[in-house]
Amino acid sequence: MDGGQLKRPAGRLWSAALIATLGSQFLSALADNALIFAALAVVHRQSYPQWAGPLLQEFFIVTYILLAPFVGAFADMQPKGRAMLWANAVKLAGALAMCLKVNPFLSYAVVGVGAAAYSPAKYGILADLVPPTMLVKANSMLESATIVAILLGAVAGGALTDWSISGVLIMIAACYAAAMLGTLLIPKLKAARAHADFAFAASIRKFATQTASLLKARDLRAALVGTGVFWGAGAALRFLLIAWVPAVLHIEGTSMPGYLTGMVAAGIAAGAVLAGRFVKLESAYYAVYAGILLGVGVSLLPLVRGLPTAFALTAFVGTCSGFLVVPLDALLQHHGNESGGIGSTIAIQNLFENLCMLALMSAYTGAMYAGVHINIIALGIGLLIALSMATLLVGHNLRPK
């Protein structure tokens, strides 16, 4: 290191800093994905109506949207490892609040604040650790670590909440604390900007200008919409499975939805590996085709009648998702690194992702409130995903130049 800045070896992928980043991300994501099952169990225990479960997720999502103009500057004005440290500390505070029986919606919103600050730093740091030619591979590794964490978090959260909600919440808090310690092993990389202006009006204007600039570029526009659809579909699918399993497969409890969510996660890991192996940065927009298959897979859910088919279909949906998101993430990170403010680019990406999540979760909550059958909801969400991705291909002429 020189002056606090890590010297990135040309052509080298693995480093102690990358290993520390992957480890911290694994622990934080493990806690995130166990927490949603624990929070839902708390809401159920406190006798909220069924449609309040998706509403819980919306409290989390809104924090991303409201903080989007500010969290990118927060990540860029300091070493990104330290930004990850403070963000995990906020997540820990939210988990502890839920342990202490603070209102679950408020507690989950606090975790959302930490997650909103964490995302630009965890993705933005990759461009500082590896050369551009290895950015897709580094993203594949980060997504694989994340997916393994989602798999274990969903299975553990779904199974252990049937045993002890308090025990799971304590485990989650411990994971956030361990993730904080992991970030201390990340060298102090040079900040992208020495200073940041957090004045409200100025931040909004600058954020709007940066967003308009991204939307003018064909490939970046596709990346914003494509990753947004991925995260929106993931949020809706998680709650869809929680309601679909007892309604269609007639299996009660949180364990089986957790297992199916884990199968989606395993598929995403496989798709991430395939994308890292076969997709180059200059052709990342090809991944949008996988988004159409993702929508088709979700729309086939009403045809499932047994567990083997359910596991196979959720694995297929996950594989399409992983192949979709990894190259598009890398494309945005590369642009952000070249423009000198990757944190701001990721914050804009987060805004699009969470607007998509809010739209799909609001539609899902409304349909549940109206009493629409869960299979009809699944069909509608799947068709919406497939059509939106197909429209992106046609409307924006996403073909090789």
Image: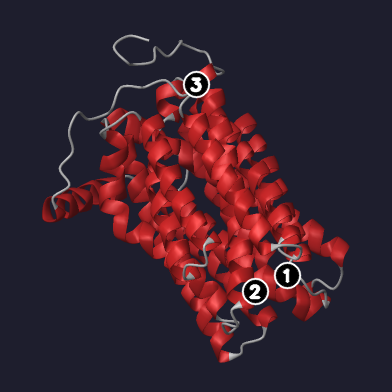
Of the image marks 2 and 1, the number of the one nearer the N terminus: 1
Dot 1: element: helix
Q: Which residue is mark 2?
A: 378
- Residue toward you, 21 or 277: 21
> What SS does tag 2 mark?
helix
At x 47% / y 21%, what residue is drawn? 130
Instruction: Report which residue position mark 3 lands on.
Output: 17
Q: Amino acid at mark 1?
A: Leu
Residue position for label 1: 301
Residue in the image at 18% along x and 54% along y: 204
Give percent across and percent down for residue 359: 44, 70
Tell me: 321 left or right of 401.
Answer: right
Q: How much space separates mark 1 and mark 3, taking CA atoms?
A: 41 Å
298, above or below 12, in the image:
below
Amino acid, disc 2: Ala
Rendered view: 375 above or below 148:
below
